[in-house]
């Protein structure tokens, strides 16, 4: 989908969101496609480690192709990740190139522990549009405490290696982002600022396109130690979530959910083995969900009632912390 058509589609989504339309009539603009729910780490800020083994599997490539074929010409991009580490899927390069051939943008969010020279070459040449590296901590001690099973220096070298290969190939894509988790309890002490300075300085020879910081969220109430907490949530102003009007999340098995925050799949709205994406996005279950957001009844339903995402400050439905990123990704050339 070209940018002009995408912007017109965003306008349509925005007005549908403002009016809280129950049946928008269009297709989603973005998909979260869970290429795999397996992960090689057991991170403190992720619920993947609590999932049963029976729910840790790869998406079948034929199911993936069905998703792409159904949405070609309608969606702008697809996040080829959700609850797992996408680089674990043996066909991730083929998945990227298949979507690229259908003019669908692709994005990866990875812990980077599995990146090597060959895999870096493969996903760059496959036509990946964006890759973000999740790196939770500026120091070895901090990082390895948050990322159980990962090695600080090795992961840093993997990221630097990827950036070097991209430069050697003369590739304009993918857009490269390093995302560092910062905590609200952190004080901006001189030591903390020095740690951040030396971490960023390590990328001077091959800098990424962006380095951004994020604060942890509670995954729809599944992580008690992250986000504002239940007492704060009960007294805070709630905003209607934009997810039901612009995106869908698809688990490895084809089950569909309205939101990527629904980590354990407590709010299913369809199954791609029974219905199409268009049918699900305009179907009875998601229409009921939109109606609940409109009436305020959503706060009686899990996972929304315990999710800290709807308590964020927003502007026109967009969380204020993401405004700059939204403009760069969707409006700026």
Image (tube, rainbow, N blue to C red):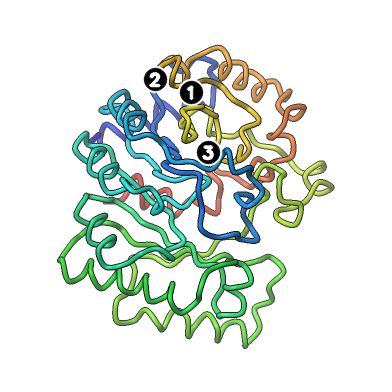
Residue at left offset 45%, top offset 43%: 36
Relative image position of residue 242 (x, y in whole percent):
54, 34
* Mark 1 or mark 3: whose residue is earlier in sequence: 1
Q: Is residue 173 left or right of residue 303?
A: left
Residues packed near mark 2 inside 10 Å, few (<14), some (14 to 19) or many (20 plus): some
Residue at left offset 23%, top offset 56%: 122
| Quadrant including the N terminus | top left
Q: Which element type, helix, strand or loop, lies under badge 1?
A: helix
Disc 2 designates what residue?
26
Q: Is residue 8 above or below residue 159?
A: above
Relative image position of residue 238 (x, y in whole percent):
70, 37
Relative image position of residue 178 (x, y in whole percent):
43, 65
Disc 3 designates what residue?
316
Disc 1 designates what residue?
16
Residue at left offset 44%, top offset 21%: 272
> CA gap, disc 1 to disc 3?
12 Å
* Mark 2 or mark 1: whose residue is earlier in sequence: 1
Residue occupying the far right of the picture: 231
Task: State the image quarter where residue 203 is shown.
Answer: bottom left
């Amino acid at each position: 989908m070209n940018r002009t058509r995408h912007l017109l589609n965003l306008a349509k989504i925005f007005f549908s969101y403002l009016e809280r339309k129950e049946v928008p009539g269009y297709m989603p603009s973005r998909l979260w496609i869970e290429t795999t729910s397996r992960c090689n780490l057991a991170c403190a800020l992720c619920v993947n480690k609590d999932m049963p083994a029976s729910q840790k599997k790869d998406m079948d490539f034929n199911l993936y192709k069905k998703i792409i074929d159904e949405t070609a010409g309608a969606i702008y991009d697809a996040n080829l990740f959700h609850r797992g580490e996408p680089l674990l899927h043996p066909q991730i390069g083929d998945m990227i190139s298949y979507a690229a051939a259908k003019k669908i943008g692709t994005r990866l969010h990875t812990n980077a522990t599995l990146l090597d020279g060959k895999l870096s070459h493969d996903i760059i040449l496959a036509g990946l549009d964006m890759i973000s590296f999740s790196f939770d901590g500026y120091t070895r001690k901090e990082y390895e405490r948050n990322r159980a099973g990962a090695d600080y220096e090795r992961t840093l070298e993997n990221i630097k290696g990827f950036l070097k290969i991209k430069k050697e190939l003369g590739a304009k894509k993918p857009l490269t982002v390093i995302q560092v988790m910062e905590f609200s309890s952190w004080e901006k002490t001189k030591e903390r600022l020095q740690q951040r300075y030396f971490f960023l300085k390590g990328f001077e020879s091959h800098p990424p396109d962006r380095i951004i910081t994020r604060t942890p969220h509670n995954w729809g109430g599944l992580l008690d130690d992250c986000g504002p907490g239940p007492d704060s949530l009960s007294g805070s102003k709630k905003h209607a979530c934009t997810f039901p009007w612009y995106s869908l999340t698809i688990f490895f098995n084809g089950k569909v959910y309205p939101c990527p925050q629904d980590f354990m799949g407590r709010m299913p709205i369809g199954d791609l083995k029974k219905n199409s994406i268009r049918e699900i996005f305009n179907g009875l279950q998601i229409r009921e969900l939109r109606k609940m957001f409109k009436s305020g009844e959503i706060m009686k339903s899990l996972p929304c009632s315990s999710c800290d995402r709807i308590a964020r400050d927003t502007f026109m439905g967009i969380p204020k912390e993401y405004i700059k990123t939204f403009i760069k990704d969707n409006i700026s050339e």
